[in-house]
Amino acid sequence: MSDIKKVVLAYSGGLDTSVILKWLKDTYQCEVVTFTADLGQGEELEPARAKALQFGIPAASIYIDDLREEFVRDFVFPMFRANTVYEGEYLLGTSIARPLIAKRLIDIVNETGADAICHGATGKGNDQVRFELGAYALKPDVKVIAPWREWDLLSREKLLNYAETHGIPIDMKHRQGGSPYSMDANLLHISYEGRHLEDPNAEAEEDMWRWTVSPEKAPDQVEYIELTYAKGDVVAINGAAMKAHEVLAKLNEIGGKHGIGRLDLVENRYVGMKSRGCYETPGGTILLKGHRAIESITLDREVAHLKDDLMPRYASLIYNGYWWSPERKALQVLIDHTQQNVNGTVRMKLYKGNVIVAGRDSKTDSLFDSTIATFEDDAGAYDQKDAGGFIKLNALRMRIAAKLDARRK
């Protein structure tokens, strides 16, 4: 008999987690609390409640939480203050959602007196690591149930057979061969994996994409937008003040219309394998470009370079599930300190998959001094003779080494 009496399950209402719900009851003979997060995935979440009720979960044990604002404000925006990109391309749309889900799972454990959490991440993926590292960081003694590491239902066919045997409703798409891709969506992105994409040399099918039109079919007219930044975060679009989640939703809409934010990537998973995925991140692509533009006139040179040096480490911490680690928190303090003067506006031109910076301005915090940078008469603001001494001093060590090399020959 298991000592686990109550479990909080991260529950989507899909095939996998519906099977897990039944399996938990049969295997652990425990009470189940379901948690479904609204991260802006654009899907109706009430069916998850209906399915949970159908499986005998009491209404008081069904949690469906709107986390959109917290997700963007406290996770996505802090990440973009660091200009975070993993392996040169990936904007971490899946990775950055997992620490929030882990946080809320632990919150519900504490509220309900549960003994454990349960997730549906497979034993091959990164999400198992992210969920569990987050959970242990927030509640060190929590128990974790990972069915994919325990059961023998390791194929879609076995899952379907289990569902049919136990009277679990199966969507028609699964009966007819299933959706061709494994998808995960939130306000920052939508990802596609599996099936056709398991061949890294096969081009993604056009009808796979859901959020963006192809650049070829995007409007022939340029669209300009203006982003207003306050301490590194976008607070308004075209002069209209918005909440954090509204900003990202609006930029997704605008960017998707112009075919912005598609990515086809083979990434190095934390568990050791290479994995191919396709992503749509229209709003995030615009945010990243705009943030670097406003920083270009408001950040000191060496501070900007230091941030660039630290960014790959910061990105790896998020990708590998260390959002709640001491080192990520320490880095965040430094990053946020650099953003105090990152204020102003960025004008951007969107056209057929491209995001082009058309202008940037900061009335109060710009370090750009046109009287010094001008190619015209600077009225003595900059003494060009100073450059000679600077160059000679920086060349001194190389000149000494060159002379020594010459004597050796």
Image: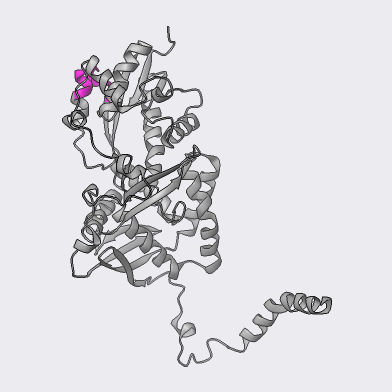
The total of numbered circles placed on residues is 0
On screen, residue 126 versus residue 403, left or right, reads left
On screen, residue 166 versus residue 328, left or right, reads left
Q: Which residue is drawn at 80% across and 76% down?
A: 404
On screen, residue 327 versus residue 248, left or right, reads right
The quadrant where residue 39 appears: top left
Residue 56 visible in rendering: no
Tell which residue pokes out farthest to the right in this image.
407
Tell which residue pokes out farthest to the top in this image.
1
x, y percentage for residue 173?
A: 18, 33
The C terminus is located in which quarter?
bottom right
Residue 277 visible in rendering: yes
The quadrant where residue 148 appears: top left
Nearer the observer, 278 or 350: 278
* Above or below, comparing residue 151 to residue 36 in the picture: above
Q: Residue at x 44, y 36 (%)?
A: 130
Residue 197, magenta (yes or no) = no
Range shown magenta:
51-62
Q: Residue at x 36, y 67 (%)?
A: 344
Residue 59, magenta (yes or no) = yes
x, y percentage for residue 55?
A: 22, 17
Snapshot colouring: one colour
x, y percentage for residue 91?
A: 39, 51
The N terminus is located in which quarter?
top left
* Above or below, comparing residue 150 to residue 288 in the picture: above
Tell which residue pokes out farthest to the left in this image.
172
* Above or below, comparing residue 238 to residue 22 in the picture: below
Nearer the observer, 51 or 81: 51
x, y percentage for residue 5?
A: 38, 12
